[in-house]
Image (spheres, rainbow, N blue to C red):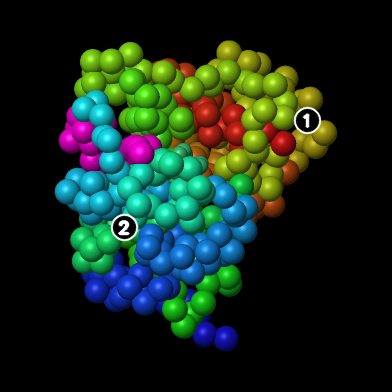
Amino acid sequence: MSEIRVLAPHNIDEAAAVLRDGGLLGLPTETVYGLAANAEDEAAVARIYQVKGRPSGHPVIVHIGSVESLNDWATAIPEFAMKLAHAFWPGPMTLVLPRTSRAKDFITGGQNTVGIRIPNHPVALDVLQTFGGGVAAPSANQFGAVSPTSALHVLADLGSRLDPQTDAIIDGGDSQVGIESTIIDCTSGTPRILRSGAITQQHLEEVTGLSVTAPDDSIKAPGTLASHYAPSAQVILLNENDDIETEIKKLKSQLHIGFIALERIRTPYGALRLAMPQDAKHYASELYAALREADNQNLEYVVAVAPTGVDIAHAVRDRLTRAAHS
Ligand code: TXA
Ligand code: MG
């Protein structure tokens, strides 16, 4: 059995050729790694779903290499969306806009809107600009699992499902932001955040001068919050003012517990420290590798103390809440 090719970051031409020839490419971005295909190639996009085990009908984000290509994919773009594009692209932000005929049903899940992003990663930008067209790319993990933030994560998750003849992964180092892009619905009069991320409600309000609708991050009733971003270990989400030792004593097993919290919160007795980030931004960049490490170590539980705040901490709490939802 031949191995899947892992390209070095300078092998841009080879990576672009994978897309041109209808293959799948593990693509580094500043948020998480994507599983990329030519967004106009229906068969290649169908393989993304197959490899990820993703239910059909979920729309995928189209990645482009410059703002000039935006009109190829989206139309009726409101002024506030152009302000956001110029302020935050390339960057960890996806805009949902009315689609052009280029964005086919197999990209949009049959909706009349399309999600567009220009990633801020040198390898991704070079690949996109060399390839020239739009690139469909969901996160390169199995559906519902933790997103990958390194080429090795992609290899571990999807390596055996990719085709060495046609597919490859290009290594761009660790993803610096570490959690997925902020998704903003731009199809009504004001921006509406569909998924939180590094670009926050405050950033959007500053740039647009509009009031921005943010998603509700309160713990929702069971069943309304799909489990996502989840490792095999059970994630227990705590707040800073919880009594951590007491909460841990309530768990069925006191062995095999991983712990994630800001540096200043001390590791409870017997737990394995998986990350000790200095602040919420650092927390975001380390979170997914820490959740993966819990599974590598066969831990039964991950106790995570959520960071507080309205910056990227908001998005970290969102991901932890979903990871903790069984
Ligand atoms: O940071 C990111 O956004 C990464 C990197 C690879 O760019 N991509 C990513 O893709 O997270 P994915 O497919 O794992 O998550 C994209 C989300 C999905 O929940 C999808 O439903 C939503 O974006 N989405 C895409 N197009 C949409 C649309 N037209 N309307 C509403 N939601 C959309
Ligand atoms: Mg995903």
The mark nearer the N terminus, 2 or 1, is 2
Q: Is residue 123 left or right of residue 240?
A: left
Q: Nearer the viewer, mark 2 or mark 1?
A: 2
Which residue in the rendered view is the most extreme toward the bottom? 1
Which secondary structure, mark 1?
loop
Q: Amino acid at mark 2?
A: Gly
Residue 322 in the image, given as x and y percentages of width and height: 60, 34
Q: Is residue 131 left or right of residue 3?
A: left
In the image, what residue occupies the spot 58% across and 13% down?
Answer: 241
Rendering quarter of residue 176: top left
Which residue in the rendered view is the most extreme toward the right? 252
Instruction: Let me know if residue 301 is in the magenta part.
Output: no
Give the labeled residue for mark 1: 251
Q: Amino acid at mark 1?
A: Leu
219 shown above or below 98? above
Instruction: Let me know if residue 84 is in the magenta part.
Output: yes
Q: Is residue 309 left or right of residue 217?
A: left
Can the viewer see residue 271 in this picture?
Answer: no
The magenta-colored residue range is: 81-98
Question: In which of the image's four quarters is ligand 1 placed?
Answer: top left
Marks 2 and 1 sit apart, C-alpha to C-alpha, by 48 Å
Give the labeled residue for mark 2: 134
Camera-side residue: 114 or 286?
114
Rendering quarter of residue 21: bottom left
Residue 29 in the image, given as x and y percentages of width and height: 34, 52
Residue 231 in the image, given as x and y percentages of width and height: 63, 46
Q: Is residue 180 left or right of residue 227?
A: left
In the image, what residue occupies the spot 53% across and 67% down?
Answer: 47
Residue 26 is marked as: none
Camera-side residue: 189 or 232?
189
